[in-house]
Image (spheres, rainbow, N blue to C red):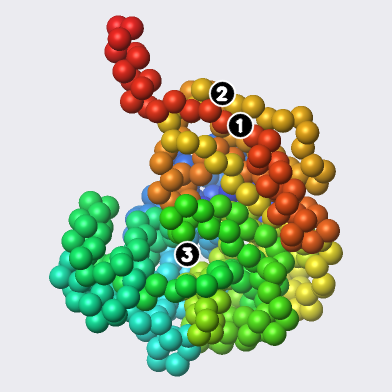
Amino acid sequence: MAPRIALLGGRLNVLKSASDLGCEVVLVHTPGRYDTDAAARYCVDVVEAPLADEEAAVAAGRALFARQPVVRFFSPSELGLVPAARLNEEFGLGGNSVHTVRLLKDKSAMRRRLAEVGLSPVRFRVVHSAAELAEFLSELGGPAMVKPLDYGGSAHVHRAEAAADAAGIWEKAEAAGRDRMLAEEFLVGHEVSVEAFTDDGAHTVVAVTDKLLGAGGFIEAGHSVPARVDEATRQEIVELTTRLLDAVGLVEGPSHTEIMITGSGLRIIESHNRAGGDSIPELVRQAYGVDLVRSAVAVPLGIEPWQPEVPPAVAGSAIRFVPAEPGVVTGVEVSDDMPEGVTLDVKARPGMVVPPLTWSVDRVCGQVIAVGTDAADAAARCDKAVAGIRITTTPETTVAGEAGERA
């Protein structure tokens, strides 16, 4: 009998992967977030529930379990991780504990846990007001990163240079509905992410990914695999990641950990018990032949065994996000002279609005993925492809003004 599973969130490629494994897939998703007709091709049922509301998501999971039980709740989405863990624990289905998932979900809880075990020291504080933020900045004596405790995609992240910045940053935090933020020392160096997989408590680092940051230094402009780090540094990254995952008690599934290589050593930025976003699992698959999306379901259910010996990289892979000036798209031109090994996904269309780049969701114009002989070659192919894409925009205020004049 085909195993029936519930996915709390997940893109079409995740749904297809689970369906291809022979699973009966029930998708639980936020209303309006998915093309329900497209999702229905891979699902036996589609349930709408606001994943951002933890209690509502758990209630939806209980209701679908009452109608017909599932063997496991999974979430490839940040918002569904805690509800999935709660449901698995409530119904005795296995998986990572709620305690572990909350440690990774709450960035301050993870910082406290790292401090308890003496791992990756970073000065931090949860602040509840502009005054508390100013006090921390004064004590720190240098710049700080100020961010939400429980969100991703580089949303509502700010750099504070000194105490004088506290009032302005706190005003923005309150405008975003935040009454507490995590302030931590600003880490300087080269940032990488670590794509790992855990099977029965044993952790395998599959790949280390180079991260390219765009304007402002917070939002990813691209990634490449394998990271261009020396072997000694890679081994340090593997050891640190393994110690982190042990410290939080991860027992199964993919993880995505962000690390800064600083002049004072490696420092953990944050970690998640899910595969990385930004198509990183696809880059890993192309470079190493390891399918983290498939394994996330196949291994815990015993459909396929996990292979802890990661093969050497057979290629390099990279992704770059297509940029454009904020405004209304007036034209899209794509050069016919594209390098080999490139896959284009240009989403920009005339009339589409390109928002200012404030977090990863604002990268609406599309992406380019390339495969090369190594990571540098793949990145170069990406960059050449992006240079051959020209998106013109007109500021929204201009468009609105012209419409008013015509009226």
Q: Are marks 1 and 3 in contact (CB under 8 Å)?
A: no
Inspect the image, locate mark 3, and give the three-letter code of the amino acid beneath it. Answer: Leu
Identify whether 186 is placed above or below 179: below
Q: Nearer the viewer, residue 75 or 246?
A: 246
Compare marks 1 and 3 and give the one earlier in the sequence.
3
Question: SS at mark 2?
Answer: strand
Q: In the rendered view, would you say 325 is above or below 283?
A: above
Q: At 36% from the left edge and 68% from the top edge, which residue is drawn?
A: 145
Between label 1 and label 3, give the one nearer the viewer: 1
**Residue 50, how many percent across, how many down?**
39, 50
Residue 137, image x, y percentages:
26, 74
Residue to which mark 2 is pinned: 331
**Residue 298 placed where, x, y %?**
70, 65
Q: Position of residue 48 (x, y in %)?
A: 44, 45
Q: Is residue 143 above or below residue 395?
A: below
The type of residue carrying mark 1 is Arg
> Circle 3 sits on which residue?
81
Does label 2 or label 1 sit earlier along the sequence? 2
Q: CA distance from mark 3 to mark 2?
A: 39 Å
Question: Which numbered circle lies on residue 390?
Answer: 1
The reply to whether callout 2 and callout 1 are in contact (CB within 8 Å) is yes
State the image quarter where residue 82 is shown. Answer: bottom left
Query: Tag 1, which secondary structure?
Result: strand
